[in-house]
Structure formats: structure tokens, C-alpha cells
Image (spheres, rainbow, N blue to C red):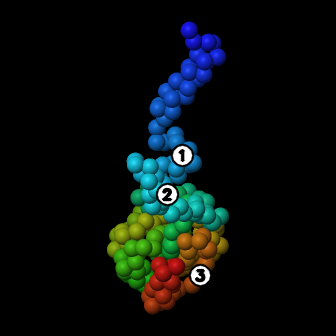
Amino acid sequence: MISCSKRRVALSAFVLLAVAGCGSPTTTTAASTTAAATTTSTGSPASAAPTTPAATVPEQLRFTAKTVDGADFSGETLAGKPAVLWFWAPWCPKCQREAPGMASAAKDNASVTFLGVAALDKEPAMRDFVKRFGLGGFTHLADLDSAVWKRFGVTAQPAYAFIGRDGEVEVETGQLSEEKLRERVAALAGA
């Protein structure tokens, strides 16, 4: 005959095994995921993938906005990635001159995220500008109330924000030559 204490131990072990078997990958803890990643099914050590710390989100990227096409966009999606924000207005002659160079730089630098931030006009004019200058290769925000411009301290167009993988943000106001833009983008891509 089995004693009560042995029965409780056996029942406890059974419950623990049953509960452990019901877990799913989405509910595993970081410690168990790490342990699983460091051994193979035969129990031998496996090469562990390097872990990268979560990207620091600069304060300027803590925003949500609508694109010129009406989709939602979160600035936090840019954290940890090299990115160029181009602040423009559809009626701006300097922005119109820069547009082909921006389209070309974005096309030639797939490792850098480009984001246009349009303001000081209405959405139809913004969409027309994107279409007219072949800027559909990257996302453009309709910053109708200039809230994103304000986050970056932009008061006139054109302007740029260069964001490194480390979250460092450098804002440059004024027009950039295509050569200078490409130098800045290359520096971001190489970082």
C-alpha cells in the first residue's frame, strides 16, 4: 500500500509534467528559450545565435502618423535601423529639385530606410507630388499638423533627420546636394 505522502509526491510530479507539456512556444520564458537554443536534440551544445539587445527608441521616434495613402505608421519601427527622414512640402521648389535625387538614393541604398515627411499642404497635393516625382519606393507621411516636424525641430523645408542604428539623431536643415546626401547615406549604411 502506498502512503499518503508518497501519493502526494507522485500526484504533484504528474501535475507538473502535465502542465509542462501544455506550454506553447509563445509562453516559454527567455531562460527556457535560451537553454533550448544552446543544445541539440542529442543534448550536445549547439552554436548559440548572438543575442542583440532591444533597440533604443529615440524620443523623436515615439510617434504615430498616417501615410499619404491613409495607412498607420509608427515611428518606433525605425528604431535600431539606419534611416533618413526627408521633410518636404509639395509646393516647395527646392523639394521638387531634390525629389529625383531622393528617389535615386532610396533605390540605391536598400539597407537604409527612407521616410518622407510631407507637411504644409493637403493630402491630394502630397500624393500627387509622390507620384509626379517617382517617390513611391519609400513611405511618405502626411504630417498635416506638422507634429512630426515639431518632434525633430524642423521649421522649414527641406530638412533631414539622419538616424543611426544606435538611435543617434542628427537633423540637418536646408537643401542638400545629391552628392552630400549620398555621402550621409553611405555613412549610415556603413555604421
Q: Which one is in front in this view, the residue at disc 1 or the one at disc 3?
A: 1
Q: Mark 1: few, some, or many residues within 10 Å (few <14, many ≥20)?
A: few
Above or below 32: residue 88: below
Q: Nearer the viewer, residue 56 or 85?
A: 56
**Mark with earlier residue (3, 2):** 2
Q: Which residue is mark 3?
A: 172
The N terminus - image quarter? top right
Front in this rendered view, residue 44 or 181: 44
Secondary structure under the numbered disc 1 in the rendered image? helix
Q: In the drawing, what numbered circle is on residue 32? A: 1
From the viewer's perspective, is residue 171 above or below residue 167? below
Q: Is residue 91 visible?
A: yes
C-alpha separation, residue under disc 3 versus residue under disc 2: 23 Å
- Residue 11 percent coordinates (x, y): 56, 20
| Amino acid bearing label 2 | Phe
Separation of disc 2 and disc 1 at Cα?
A: 34 Å
